[in-house]
Image (cartoon, grey):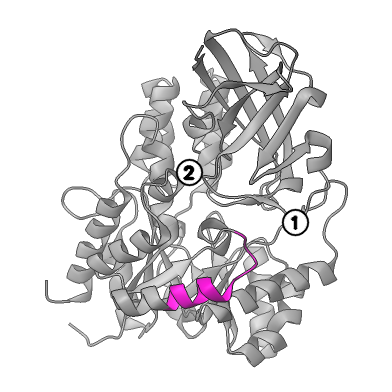
Amino acid sequence: MFDKYMICEEGLQNVVENGAVTGFQFGARLPYYRGLGLSMVEDIGITVDGETIPHEQVLFSVRGRTWTLEQMETEIEERWEMGEVAMLIVQRNGGLSSGDHKIELMEQLRISYLPFPSITRDTKTLTLAN
Amino acid sequence: MTKHNIKRGVSLYSFQEEYFLRQLTLEQCIAKAAEIGAKGIEIIGEQMVPGFPKLTDEFVAQWFGWMDKYGTTPVCHDMFLDTKRYKHRLLTAEEQLESVLRDLKFAQRLGCKVVRILVSASPDVIEKAIPYAEELDIKMGIEVHSPFHFDQSWILRHLEVMDRTCTKHYGFIPDFGMFTSRYPRVQRERFLRLGVRPHIADYICDSYEQRIFAEYIVGNVREMGATPLEIGMAESARHQIWSNPKRLLEHMPRIFHIHAKFYEMQDDYTEYSIPYNQIIPLLIEGGYDGYLSSEYEGNRHIQDVQEVDSVEQVRRQHVMFQRLLGEGA
């Protein structure tokens, strides 16, 4: 459900802090028909150009607040709203080069009424502008 | 035609595709519903009310403003119960009750007199919520949703509580997915696009129509040398059911809201899988006087290949309702 809308087509960019490129980010949505508390977003897996990003390098950011995946596990107040674009930030020195990059995204959700984890994937080639 | 007092509405769940993609705002969803003549509005707070469960006075004022502007009526709020909110433990019974009460209050502020109770909710927890529902005058309806049906053992536990307590504030919301006579064509076609071989898809759909027990369908497909995807399609038959629509008559006193589920409204204004022409006369016969609330669920099966037009799908369903309810066009 909503698989193909998980990765936003626009918005891949490098993250610059104090003049240094510390990573890259892109927009993502929840593949679900309602919003969900962040504690129930069990896992976010990112692969870029075939390279799997270690979990500790991934940050989730929405409405001006940012969490590590570990911090999300205990966040029971804030929600990822339905269709809302969150930023997935990958901490990686140098970020990405300009041009096309193949992004693979997996989101694993803990949906209380489902007897199994909900795992959804999307793959898109995004372009990083100069 | 026998006189009846059946009203038409829509669950905004139906417009999830357009809302998700920000093609329709909440206000526009309500406006579209009104244009179609679906004047009773059902909302899923967790879907279309950002910041749920918080409700600002401003939002509530705007909500009632929209109801006035478009001539619509708030009818139902659909609750969820996140028993798995925490990673390492389930919610306690007290926490579950608290979550149910949160949704009852949410519904009340939005003027909804009915709350859809998720089918997986425990009858013990709902029983504890009855006094609160009575005080708020909100009817709690357990959603009898496929593969559950009226005679399924979990639903019978809920029925036992309804009978024992004799409350008017706890009953059924049947989801008409439990009257899926044919395997949905849109779902079959999606499986074909994903790579299911046509002879396997045909076997599954034919077996479903012959009412072959889903476990046999899965087993037989395995023996046919099915791929994991094909087994997945066979397993999806476990989640569809055809149950007897006449059971609606027996339970009519406990039914105060209906999810008029559909997957595909065709050009001729009939639903491919669910025989509404058999079901709606039973509602009239039984004196049902609540809303038929449209619940379109076909988008997930077609969104990979075509633009979804949920509004047109709901419109077609209401043309069908008008015909079956004997309303002048």
From the viewer's perspective, is B217 left or right of B286? right
Q: In the picture, residue A89 is in which quadrant?
A: top right
> Callout 1, which amino acid?
Glu
Quick check: B23 above or below B275?
Answer: above
Q: In the picture, residue B284 is in which quadrant?
A: bottom left
Name the image quarter holding the N terminus of chain B: bottom left
> Callout 2, which amino acid?
Ile
Which residue is at a point 36% across and 36% down the rendered structure image?
Answer: B302
From the viewer's perspective, is A105 left or right of B271? right
Query: Residue B11: where, in percent of width, then height?
Result: 42, 64
Residue labelled with disc 2: B212
The residue lying toward the viewer, choosing from B198 and B111, is B111
Label 2 chain ID: B
| Disc ID at residue A77 | 1
From the viewer's perspective, is B216 left or right of B198? right
Say whether residue B75 is visible. no
Label 1 chain ID: A
Q: Quick one: SS at disc 1?
A: loop
Query: Residue B2: where, in percent of width, then height?
Result: 21, 85
Which residue is at a point 64% across and 78% down the rendered structure image?
Answer: B105
Q: In the picture, residue B295 is in which quadrant?
A: bottom left
* Magenta residues (range): B51-64
From the viewer's perspective, is A68 left or right of B298? right
